[in-house]
Image: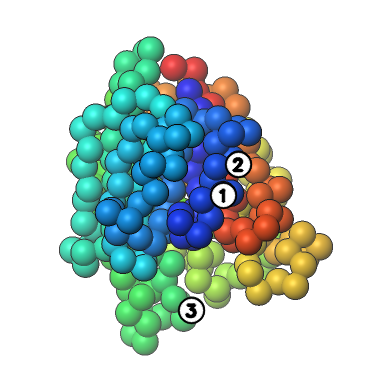
């Protein structure tokens, strides 16, 4: 089973890019973040025409939004409102697989604004609270069984998940407090970092490059903000990783690139 996660930064604007991905890479399941549209406006017909007839969406007007599109039937759809702000930042589904159903959680963690100071930046406070709630959620056993957690978690936790560890220690997405809280999330669920299963922690690994860079490829100042985590029950099923870096250079791209994990079902 191939599962792809991608912060698309407006699904309607970038539907041609999504269609190209689905035609060329053909994942079984596609998880999107920042869809930026209400459920009624989601381009369901476009996905169905591409063979992705099963969908679970959690959207809102102009902001946030997550969706799961699948070739396979989906069940047990849940949308949790973390921090009770009414934001569309989570959806979970059950995907059919030969070895038994896989529960798949799709997250879009708050970015946190520009200042890593909760006293002056409520967006950063929200991000930290969201991570605390994810930890509490994980402690309740949501990672037991055949479970995967994917999405834009908006944190680059390791030294080589950013272009410069020293330069970014005081930059939102790589500050020590964020890294610590994401580590708590990982530990609470006993999650396995599927990407780092394939790429050693000593090697650079990015999924996001800023729009502000005049030449993103030449400067290569990236961060690994997108993640795929699997439960211990799926740890032995990991087969392959694909980070589609070239997608950052497509016409009118998202600032994130698709990440695909292949599991033995």
Q: Position of residue 253 (x, y in %)?
A: 62, 58
Whichever of labels 1 and 3 marks the residue nearer the N terminus, that label is 1
Give the crowd class for mark 1: few <14, some 14-19, many >=20 residues within 10 Å: some
Say above or below: 162 vs 93: below
Q: Are marks 1 and 2 in contact (CB under 8 Å)?
A: yes
Judging by the rendered image, the residue that carries numbered circle 1 is 16
Quarter of the rendering containing residue 219:
bottom right
Residue identified by numbered label 3: 114
Residue count near mark 2 (Cα–Cα under 10 Å), binned few <14, some 14–19, many ≥20: few
Quarter of the image with the C terminus in it: top left
Q: Which mark is residue 187?
A: none
Q: Residue 240's quadrant in the figure?
A: top right
Q: Which mark is residue 20?
A: 2
- Relative to 197, 42 lies left or right: left
**Helix, strand, or loop for circle 3?**
loop
Marks 3 and 2, the one that precedes in the sequence = 2
Q: Secondary structure at mark 2?
A: helix
- Visible in this render: residue 235? no
Label total for image = 3
């Amino acid at each position: 089973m191939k599962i792809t996660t991608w912060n698309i930064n407006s699904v309607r604007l970038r539907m041609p890019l999504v269609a190209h991905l689905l035609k060329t890479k053909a994942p079984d399941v596609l998880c999107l973040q920042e869809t930026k549209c209400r459920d009624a406006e989601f381009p369901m017909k476009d996905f169905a025409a591409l063979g992705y007839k099963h969908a679970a969406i959690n959207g809102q007007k102009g902001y946030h939004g997550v969706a799961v599109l699948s070739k396979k039937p989906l069940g047990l759809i849940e949308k949790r409102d973390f921090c009770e702000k009414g934001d569309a930042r989570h959806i979970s589904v059950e995907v059919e697989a030969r070895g038994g159903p896989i529960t798949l959680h799709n997250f879009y963690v708050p970015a946190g604004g520009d200042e890593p100071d909760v006293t002056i930046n409520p967006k950063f406070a929200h991000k930290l609270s969201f991570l605390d709630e994810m930890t509490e959620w994980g402690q309740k056993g949501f990672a037991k069984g055949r479970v995967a957690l994917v999405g834009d978690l908006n944190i680059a936790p390791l030294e080589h998940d950013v272009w410069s560890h020293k330069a970014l220690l005081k930059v939102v997405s790589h500050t020590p407090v964020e890294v610590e809280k994401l580590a708590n999330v990982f530990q609470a669920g006993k999650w396995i970092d599927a990407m780092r299963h394939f790429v050693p922690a000593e090697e650079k690994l990015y999924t996001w490059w800023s729009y502000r860079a005049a030449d993103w490829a030449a400067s290569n100042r990236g961060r690994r903000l997108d993640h795929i985590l699997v439960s211990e029950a799926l740890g032995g099923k990991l087969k392959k990783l694909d980070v589609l870096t070239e997608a950052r250079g497509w016409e009118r791209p998202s600032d994130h690139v698709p990440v695909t994990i292949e599991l033995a079902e």
